[in-house]
Each structure stands twice: as structure tokens, then as C-alpha cells.
Image: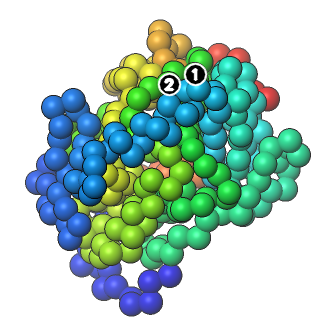
């Protein structure tokens, strides 16, 4: 952990108010720039183009049809059944040869045919939030893995073939964040990268002050990650729909009386905020996922009609 204690009262945690001006604030390791293709370049490559670095690894994966799929489970928020369901969904929805690995601090209850490895170590101040262990995925020699790797959050639901995620060209691919997309941030629920190529992410994290992470990146791991990698390619917009934006009406009053609709397109359904696949199936918010206390308590957890159809996908 960070030894120097911070006068944290001076640094208000910014949940949803990261502005374009903040995003453009230069760091000590360079300012990202948008390419005409929509990809982000955070740092110029030394000794050759970025494509020359990742393209051979990408082509090797296409030839062998082999890739890793990884997830992370730490703490008590998600039980082993979430890992088991995710692994089953992956295996049902790809023709590739997959090595599925769960990095966890507690493998009890995870099916024996799922490879479990210890959580990679990431040192961070807990006041930055709880999601920073994800940066450990970018360590060199991660768990003895190599090559193309797809990371999935435990609370996503696979609703279509995953094969295109392995065939889509790019060095580092991520979902474009739905809120304020002009800022160029990603949502790290679905990330594909190559083991060892993004090891500078951790170096840049340790070189960036907690004050800057709070004020510029809103204490959000995915904001920092999007800026800290050398190049970003966003997945096609319709591949990873968000449940809250795609399946529900925008107004809360209409939501209360509405049954969530199935996405008409998409491959991975992403959940964020206080909704999970489990809570959506019963039409509620998950109180354990609320980031901050409410000023006035609500007298019911009901938010919309149950989305039972999620259970057709989200199963072992």
C-alpha cells in the first residue's frame, strides 16, 4: 500500500463528472491523442510501429485458433457460482481453443475443471476505490500465460458468439464508455490484449500520484487504463450493449412498469451500476453494489419487471 497518507478531504471523489478538460490534462508520461481511425495513441512507439509489435501475435492466434479468457474474483461480493457460469457461457459460445483462468483469492467452490491462479499483486491506496487489482492483468509473465487474452467481468452475460472478439484486429481492444463517449474512455468489462505488451500500465500507475488519479481519472480504473496503454481500439458499438441503456426505458417511471427487452443485437451484455444479472432477473437493484449511500432511503428494491430471459444465457 502507499506509505504516505493523503489529506484526502482535499480530493473529492468524482464519480460521473470527469470533464473533457480534466481528460486532456497532461500526465508525466504523455498525453493521449486520437487517431483518425478512432484508436487512441498514448505514447509513440520506439523502434517501429505498434502494428509491428502486436500483429505477429495476432496472426499466430488466428492460425492456431488459441486464446486465453481470464476473469478475476476477489473479496465476497461474488461467489464461485459467478465464475462457474461465466466459464460455461464462454465454452458454449466459441469454437476457439480456450484456456480459461480465474485469478482469485479464494478458489473454494469453483469447478475443478476451471484453472485458478492467485491474484496478481497490485499496491494501491484503498481510497482510490476497489477495482484497481484489474491492473495486475498487465503484468509480464502473468500466470504463465502468453499470447491473445480476453478479459471478462464476472457480471457480464454472453448472448452471442465470442469468436469475433478473437478475430477483431487491434493491440488493445475495449468497450467505449457510453456516458460522455467524446472523452474517449473505455469500459473495462470486456478487454482483449496480449500478455506482456501492456506491462507499462503498472509502471505508469505507480508513477502517477493518487491526487492526479482522483482529480483527472475520477478514481476509475478504466479511465486510467484507457489513457495508460499505448494504443486503444474500441469494439464495434453493437457488440457489447449495456443492459441499463439497451433493455430498459430511459425514464425511471416507465422502467418501474416495464419488462426489460432482449437486445436485438449484441454478443456480450454488460451490467454496470447497481444492476447485476442476478438482480435484473428479479427486477431489482443490488444494494451491495451501490457506491454511495442515498440521502433518502427507498422503501422497495423493485425497479422494473423481472427479466427472466437472462437465465437462458446466464447458466452453467
- The residue under label 1 is 163
Packing grade of label 1 (10 A; few <14, some 14-19, many >=20) is: some
View extreme (bottom): residue: 4
- Out of 250 and 163, give the one closest to the viewer: 163
Q: Is residue 7 visible?
A: yes
Question: Residue 313 placed where, x, y %?
Answer: 68, 21
Identify which residue is drawn at 57% across, 22% down. 163
Q: Nearer the viewer, mark 1 or mark 2?
A: 2
Image-quadrant location for residue 29: bottom left
Packing grade of label 2 (10 A; few <14, some 14-19, many >=20) is: few
For residue 211, above or below residue 175: below
Q: Is residue 202 left or right of residue 181?
A: right
Mark 1 and mark 2 residues within 8 Å of each other at the beta carbon? yes
Image-quadrant location for residue 177: top left
Q: Is residue 150 left or right of residue 265?
A: right
- The residue under label 2 is 167
Amino acid at each position: 500500500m502507499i506509505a504516505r497518507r493523503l489529506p484526502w478531504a482535499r480530493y473529492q471523489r468524482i464519480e460521473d463528472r470527469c470533464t473533457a478538460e480534466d481528460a486532456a490534462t497532461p500526465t508525466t508520461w504523455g498525453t493521449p491523442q486520437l487517431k483518425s481511425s478512432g484508436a487512441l495513441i498514448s505514447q509513440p512507439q520506439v523502434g517501429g510501429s505498434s502494428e509491428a509489435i502486436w500483429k505477429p501475435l495476432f496472426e499466430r492466434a488466428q492460425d492456431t485458433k488459441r486464446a486465453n479468457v481470464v476473469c478475476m474474483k476477489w473479496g465476497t461480493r461474488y461467489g464461485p457460482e459467478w465464475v462457474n457460469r461465466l466459464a460455461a457461457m464462454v465454452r458454449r459460445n466459441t469454437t476457439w481453443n480456450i484456456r480459461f483462468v480465474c485469478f482469485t483469492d479464494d478458489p473454494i467452490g469453483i469447478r475443478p475443471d476451471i484453472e485458478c491462479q492467485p491474484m496478481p499483486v497490485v499496491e494501491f491506496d484503498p481510497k482510490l476505490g476497489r477495482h484497481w487489482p484489474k491492473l495486475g492483468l498487465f503484468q509480464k509473465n502473468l500466470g504463465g500465460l502468453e499470447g491473445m487474452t480476453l478479459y471478462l467481468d464476472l457480471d457480464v452475460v454472453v448472448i452471442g458468439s465470442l469468436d469475433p472478439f478473437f478475430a477483431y484486429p487491434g493491440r488493445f481492444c475495449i468497450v467505449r464508455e457510453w456516458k460522455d463517449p467524446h472523452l474517449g474512455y473505455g469500459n473495462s468489462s470486456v478487454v482483449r490484449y496480449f500478455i506482456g505488451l501492456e506491462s507499462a500500465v503498472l509502471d505508469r500507475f505507480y508513477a502517477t500520484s493518487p491526487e492526479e488519479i482522483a482529480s483527472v481519472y475520477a478514481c476509475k480504473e478504466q479511465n486510467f487504463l484507457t489513457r495508460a496503454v499505448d494504443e486503444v481500439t474500441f469494439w464495434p458499438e453493437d457488440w457489447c450493449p449495456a443492459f441499463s441503456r439497451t433493455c430498459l426505458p430511459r425514464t425511471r417511471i416507465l422502467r418501474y412498469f416495464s419488462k426489460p427487452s432482449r437486445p436485438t443485437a449484441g454478443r456480450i451484455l454488460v451490467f454496470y451500476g447497481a444492476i447485476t444479472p442476478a438482480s435484473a432477473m428479479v427486477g431489482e437493484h443490488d444494494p451491495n453494489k451501490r457506491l454511495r449511500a442515498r440521502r433518502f432511503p427507498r422503501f422497495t428494491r423493485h425497479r422494473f419487471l423481472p427479466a427472466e430471459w437472462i437465465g437462458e444465457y446466464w447458466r452453467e
